[in-house]
Image (cartoon, helix red, strand yellow):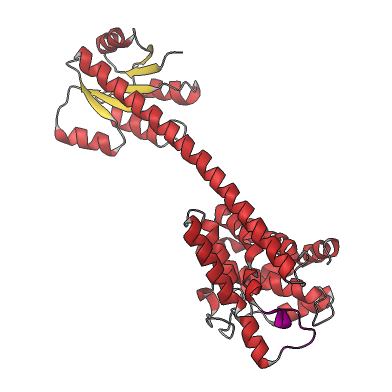
Amino acid sequence: MRDLVLIVDDVDINRMLLANILEDEYDIIEAADGPETLDILFNQKIRPTAILLDIIMPGMDGFEVIQEIKNNPETEKIPVLFITAAADGESESRGLKYGAADYISKEFNVDVVRTRLRNHISLARYQNELESLVEIKTAELTRTYDQMLEAFATLVEYRSLESGTHIKRTSMLSELMINKLMTDPKYKTYVAEQKITPAKAHSIVRATSLHDIGKIGISDTILLKPGRLTEEEFEEMKKHTVKGGEIIDSIMEMFGDNAEYLSYCREIAYYHHERWDGLGYPSRLAAYDIPFSARLLSIVDVYDALVNQRCYKPPFSHGEAMDIITESRGKQFDPVLVDVFLEVADKFEKLEDSLKD
């Protein structure tokens, strides 16, 4: 199948000359002005391989047309070569600014027209193939990260008896909260201020699985101790946050920082025991200095720990856990996120009941 070239010029003879030059190598379609060009592209949805576009046309000039082409994601990658009798530098600079690939003078030189068009079609094809290859490699790398995270999360489950389905639950509970936050109009300002995009939300949910990875470095005598920890033991236990951050750092050094969610893994592992009032650990951060990902996970983590049995305590009821978190609004937890939690608490309870250890 041959490449299709769209020739746009309000002068019939110019379109005919260019068509004669190119018709041996390409299929040709013509437009006499800007509106007809946009009709071909956006209403008829014809996708030429390249466009030869006149600058000076009545009504809608070439500069206006190319802006429409480049502002549409379906056509922005089509190479546009201006055809013009104007040889001034200002027009050329303006055209390149709007995304023109090249200029062709209306004193048509057969070899120049053919060579320039051929080169830009080849370049566009190469760029598209390269982008596709990058997308494939990125997807492969993402799968590798996912498999790596799953392996580490499984390791945490085996290492800590309290984990069980804790990792699965915290991930699902985090998703409940962040979905509520993203879809409820009253949180729109908060979402914008925290720069929470759908992609960021997805990455944070995936990253929650490694929040306790640092417990791998804590002694069994402390990690699995029944009853209350001594002051010295608690200080040692608190180090799991720093150890977790260090582990994620080492992963990022091995794999690079290509996957944004690795940075969220680190934030969550390192900061999920910080408190809104600045009395947490390990860095005593307060309020919005604590990364959003860690503020979110901290509520989920505490709720799940409260309502499930641990080697050091019996389970609390859902109502008791809600009361504890509500009382900690603006003290231990982000006030807005506590409000979000309260609105989805019934879903928390149902999910917990279905996934009890």
Assess whether residue 220 is covered by the magenta stretch: yes
Where is residue 154 drawn, in percent x and y? 70, 61
Name the outermost residue toward the front: 220
For this orientation, the residue located farthest to the left is: 88
Give the left or right position of residue 61, taking residue 279 as reference.
left
Query: Can residue 89 be seen in the rendering of this structure?
Result: yes
**222 and 88: which is toward the camera:** 222
Q: Where is residue 164 in the image (x, y as percent from the top left)?
A: 78, 66
Per the picture, the main secondary structure of the magenta-coloured stretch is loop
Considering depth in this image, is 94 or 172 the residue closer to the camera?
Answer: 172
> Is residue 78 something one can see in this rendering?
no
Q: In the rendering, at what x and y percent does residue 18 appear?
A: 28, 12
- Residue for point 73% across, 82% down: 221
Vertical relation: 103 (above or below) 306: above
Position above or below: 269 against 20:
below
Left or right, residue 308 beside residue 148: right
From the viewer's side, name the closer residue of 212 and 331.
Answer: 212
Q: Is residue 115 above or below residue 233?
A: above
User: Nearest the camera: 281 or 288?
Assistant: 281
* Quadrant of the image containing the C terminus: bottom right
Q: Is residue 144 left or right of residue 173?
A: left
- In this picture, which residue range is highlighted in magenta? 219-229
Quadrant housing residue 169? bottom right
Q: Which residue is drawn at 44% across and 31% down?
A: 129
Q: Residue at the bottom extreme?
A: 231
> Which residue appears at 29% of the width and 26% of the height?
81
The picture quadrant where one finds residue 297 is bottom right
Where does residue 282 sit, x and y in percent of width and height?
56, 81
